[in-house]
Amino acid sequence: MLRLGRIEIHRLDDGPFVLDGGQMFGTVPKVLWQRECPADADNRFAIACNCFLLVEGGRRTLVDAGVGRDWDEKSRRIYGLDPAAPTLMDRLGALGLGPGDIDRVLLTHLHYDHCGWATVPDGAGGSGGHRPAFPEAEYLVHRLEWDDAHDREARAAASYYERFFDPLEAAGQLRILEGGPEIALGGGLGALLTGGHTRGHLAWMIESAGHRALGLADLCPLAAHRRARWLTSFDLYPVEALAAKRRLLAAAEEGGWELLLNHEPDRPMRRPVRRGKDLDLDPLEA
Ligand SMILES: [Zn+2]
């Protein structure tokens, strides 16, 4: 847990899940990335699926909702989902919280590994439908992301599953964020429209008592992506992703902000530290 002024930040890992190394590092040769991320015989390695719970005053905000478990057997195998690993819901339970205790869910974007627990299958009536997993929460998504997630012709269409987000609108729990680049959300939290990874991709910033933490979401999923040109193959607008990441990492370095990494399995709360020409991200915890 990271305490930032009067805000608590808890990491809740819904992973691990397994991804292809080439997808994670795009044009970077394997001889370089495998030093930090050793791959298995199928060229894959396990990553975390970190969600962050922000507690300030009486309000609880969840940033991203994991990969979920609403997958068939084949998908579970492909993503390497471990049936024994604790889920986002288990980790909330370990903090003494249930789904009804979450007031807001900020979705950085709608790729399946960020909104898997946004909804759950609706057992009642056996209709095969889904309902919001957090019954009291307002769910926040940017307009551009919402629109692109519904474009079935889009290059990234295979990363979007409507069962994870359409029920939010049907239940009246969706709040579409407009504009940018900075969108104040109250309680010291702000969303930052970055583009790059997707057109409507959001980073987020939280501030309390002069301290700041920055969540880079998929602009810097693993600590290895701290290098500006190490981009994933999933970035739809790589030139924009590079520029946004460079700008935000420089601001974090200069401001002494903490960084929160969405997919880093090893101590994902970090602090940028300059060593010569390298920018390292040092873990905050031992
Ligand atoms: Zn993504």
Image (cartoon, helix red, strand yellow):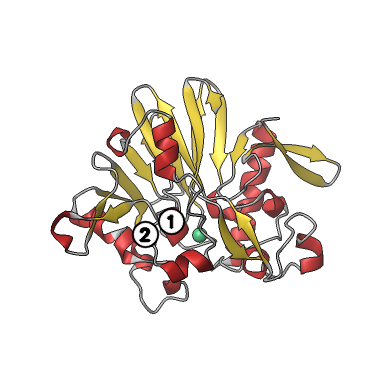
From where the camera sits, is residue 265 visible? yes
| Residue that appears at 33% across and 59% down | 164
Residue 101 relative to residue 188: left or right: left
Check mark 1 vs ligand 1: CB closer than 8 Å? yes or no: yes
Tell me the SS state at disc 2.
Answer: loop
Tell me the SS state at disc 1.
Answer: loop
* Residue for badge 2: 70
User: What percent of the width, then of the height, locates residue 86?
Assistant: 48, 44
Mark 2 to mark 1: distance in Å?
18 Å
Camera-nearest residue between 183 and 136 = 136
| Residue that appears at 39% across and 29% down | 187
> Image height check: is 222 above or below 268?
below
> Image height check: is 120 above or below 253?
below
> Image height check: is 64 above or below 239?
above
From where the camera sits, is residue 183 visible? no
Q: Earlier in the sequence, mark 2 or mark 1?
A: 2
* Residue for badge 1: 109
Q: Are marks 2 and 1 in contact (CB under 8 Å)?
A: no
Residue 36 relative to residue 55: left or right: right
Quadrant of the image containing the N terminus: top right
Task: Please give the count of numbered marks on the rendered protein.
Answer: 2
